[in-house]
């Protein structure tokens, strides 16, 4: 006789099944599409340089300073964290040429003192 396991399942889950005794949802964790089925074809941010996006809302214009608001990246449905992860996975960690301070601000220039 099968021995019940956790959550009432009659045996350990089969490969591809869940621990709750039901088939696993297709595509990834929580039923999402997973990395292979990500929306769009954007793979990081190296292919399209950043440009602020302006949209009209009624009679006023709104300027977005977010890469995820750009049409090329918005269509992918990816967050800025996902785009950063793709960049890092490809070895793209930025130019590193600018001195940066807190929150991306340019750092103070280095000066020398006679004292």
Image: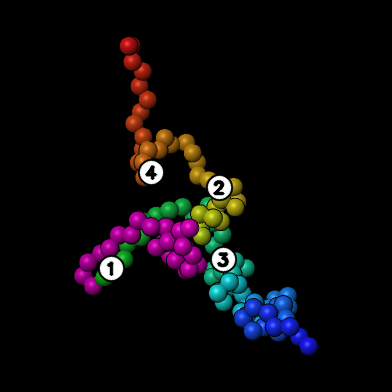
| Alpha carbon distance from label 4 to label 3 | 28 Å
The picture places residue 91, in percent across and down from the top left corner, at 59, 47
Secondary structure beneath dot 4 equals helix
Residue at x-position 64% and y-position 84%: 8
Q: Magenta includes 97?
A: no
Quarter where residue 5 is shown: bottom right
Q: Taking 92 as reference, is 64 above or below it?
A: below
Q: Which label's residue is closer to the chain start, 1 or 2? A: 1
Q: Magenta includes 76?
A: yes
Q: Which label's residue is closer to the chain start, 4 or 3? A: 3
Pointer 1: what residue? 56
Residue at x-position 53% and y-position 45%: 93
Pointer 2: what residue? 92
Would residue 43 be found to the left or right of residue 21 on screen?
A: left
The image's colouring method is rainbow
| Alpha carbon distance from label 3 to label 1 | 27 Å
| Alpha carbon distance from label 2 to label 3 | 18 Å
Crowd tier of the residue under label 1, counting other residues whose Cα lies within 10 Å: few below 14, some 14–19, many 20 or above: few
| Alpha carbon distance from label 1 to label 2 | 33 Å
- CB contact under 8 Å: marks 2 and 3: no
Q: Which label's residue is closer to the chain start, 2 or 3? A: 3
Identify the magenta region.
58-81
Pointer 4: what residue? 104
Q: Which label's residue is closer to the chain start, 3 or 1? A: 3
Pointer 3: what residue? 41
Question: Mark 2 against mark 3, which lies toward the viewer?
Answer: 2
Q: Which label's residue is closer to the chain start, 4 or 1? A: 1
Work out whether residue 72 can be spotted. Answer: no
Would residue 108 be found to the left or right of residue 6 on screen?
A: left
């Amino acid at each position: 006789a099968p021995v019940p396991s956790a959550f009432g399942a009659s045996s350990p889950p089969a490969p591809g099944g869940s621990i709750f005794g039901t088939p696993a949802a297709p595509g990834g964790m929580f039923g999402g599409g997973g990395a292979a089925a990500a929306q769009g074809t954007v793979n990081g941010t190296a292919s399209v340089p950043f440009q602020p996006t302006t949209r009209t809302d009624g009679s006023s214009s709104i300027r977005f300073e977010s890469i995820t608001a750009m049409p090329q990246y918005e269509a992918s449905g990816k967050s800025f964290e996902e785009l950063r992860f793709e960049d890092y996975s490809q070895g793209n960690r930025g130019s590193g040429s600018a001195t940066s301070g807190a929150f991306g601000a340019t750092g103070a220039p280095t000066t020398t003192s006679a004292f």
